[in-house]
Image (cartoon, rainbow, N blue to C red):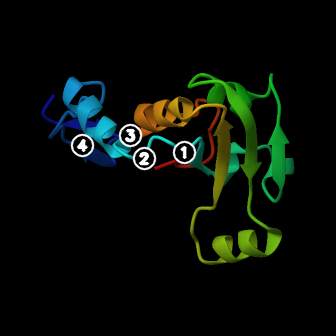
């Protein structure tokens, strides 16, 4: 499509480019990021702070099997540990006062470097979608 009206006609969007992040070219490009670095077993994934349960937003929360983000990390390899790292209350207040969006981190430690590489390769240049998010703009 050349143009499409969105937001009840308040916005008009034009389709200019499609980037296939599952293409062989993308896989080669991302795979090149790991040359000589494939020895690390840990990875940090930035998440919007509101994706975390309220109790985890201002804490470091160790996760276990059966919990959403632990199970998500297991999609990429055998997991040793997973933690959600929120913001301290003082940082949360400062971020909100500045009108910025808060960020949290998922820290995953894999038993083997291949798990961290698989997660990084799968998520580089991609977005995660949260279908339960009804109140915030995640972009």
Residue 118 can be seen, yes or no: yes
Q: Residue at x 62, y 38 (%)?
A: 133
Tell us which disc is closer to us: 2 or 4.
Answer: 2
Q: Mark 3 or 1 closer to N-term? A: 3
Q: Disc 2 vs disc 4: Cβ atoms closer than 8 Å?
A: no
- Please give the residue where the numbered disc 4 appears in the rendered image: 13
Q: In the rendered structure, are the residues bearing label 2 and label 1 in contact, judged by CB atoms less than 8 Å apart?
A: yes
Q: Which mark is residue 37?
A: 2
Residue 130 position, x and y percent, is: 58, 34
In the image, residue 76 above or below residue 49: above
| Distance from Cα at disc 1 to Cα at disc 4 | 41 Å
Which residue lies at the image location 67% right of the left edge and 40% below the top edge?
109
Q: Nearer the viewer, residue 9 or 42?
A: 42
x and y, in percent, of residue 51 in the image = 67, 44
State the residue in front, 2 or 100.
Answer: 100
Residue holding disc 1: 40
Could you give the CA–CA distance between mark 3 and mark 2, rounded to whole angstroms?
Answer: 48 Å
Q: Residue at x 83, y 47 (%)?
A: 61
Q: Which residue is mark 3?
A: 8
Q: Horizontal and vertical percent for residue 3?
A: 17, 36
């Amino acid at each position: 499509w050349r143009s499409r009206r969105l937001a009840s006609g308040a916005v008009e969007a034009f389709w200019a480019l499609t980037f296939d992040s599952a293409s062989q070219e993308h896989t080669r490009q991302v795979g090149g990021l790991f040359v000589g670095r494939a020895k690390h077993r840990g990875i940090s994934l930035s998440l919007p702070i509101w994706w975390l349960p309220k109790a985890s937003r201002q804490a470091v929360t160790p996760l276990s099997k059966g919990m959403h983000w632990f199970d998500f990390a297991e999609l990429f390899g055998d997991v040793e540990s997973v933690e959600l790292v929120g913001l301290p209350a003082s940082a949360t207040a400062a971020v909100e006062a500045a009108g910025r969006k808060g960020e949290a981190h998922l820290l995953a430690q894999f038993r083997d470097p291949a798990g961290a590489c698989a997660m990084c390769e799968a998520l580089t240049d991609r977005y995660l979608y949260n279908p339960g998010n009804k109140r915030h703009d995640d972009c």
